[in-house]
Image (cartoon, rainbow, N blue to C red):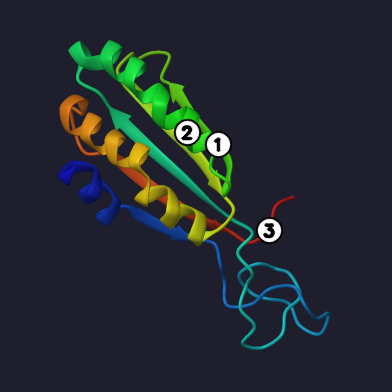
Amino acid sequence: MKKILSFVLVACIVSLAYSCNCGSKDKKCEKTGTCCQEGQKAEIKKIVITAYLDIKPDQVEKFLTDVQEVITKSQAEEGNASYNLFADLKEKNKFVFVEEWKGQAAVDIHFATEHFKKFNTLMDEVAASPAKIKIFEVINEK
């Protein structure tokens, strides 16, 4: 469990939530190019998490079997919009999770679930290196 928690702590957090959001046609925001009002906060539409995993080559089969529980149960969470695991076609021991959550509260609930804690234990066993995690706060989709 220590490994995955440290993964989250050292996660690269990229925020797309700028200091203003479309709400007025008076002024253009320099960062987003959309109209905004002074001091207005952007509304977070969803949170996207990508987690790049490097699994020990001799543990890939175990990982693929045991990870099914966290995928199925995470997809069933009320705050989840999408939760998928993708495999690298060239390097058979590299994977990436792409998760979409309906907000920070949904992410917090997910991190507290038993299935996520069980996944942390699995990662302690099978990870070849710390995961590379990026968290994006989405304010607009086109």
Secondary structure of the residue carrying numbered label 1:
loop
Residue indicated by mark 3: 140
Residue at the location (57% across, 71% down)?
18
Observer-nearest of 122 and 88:
122
Residue at the location (20% across, 50% down)?
6
* Residue type marked 1: Ala
Secondary structure of the residue carrying numbered label 3:
loop
Residue indicated by mark 2: 73
Crowding at dot 1, Cα within 10 Å, few <14 / some 14-19 / many 20+, comes out as: few
Q: Which percent across, then down, holds residue 8?
A: 29, 51
Residue indicated by mark 1: 76
Could you tell me how far apart the alpha carbons at marks 3 and 2 are, in whole angstroms?
Answer: 27 Å
Observer-nearest of 103 and 112:
112
Q: Are marks 3 and 1 in contact (CB under 8 Å)?
A: no
Of all residues, the one furthest to the front in this rendering is 114
| Left or right of 65 in this view: 81 | right
Rendered-image quadrant of the N terminus: top left
Quarter-of-image position of residue 117: top left
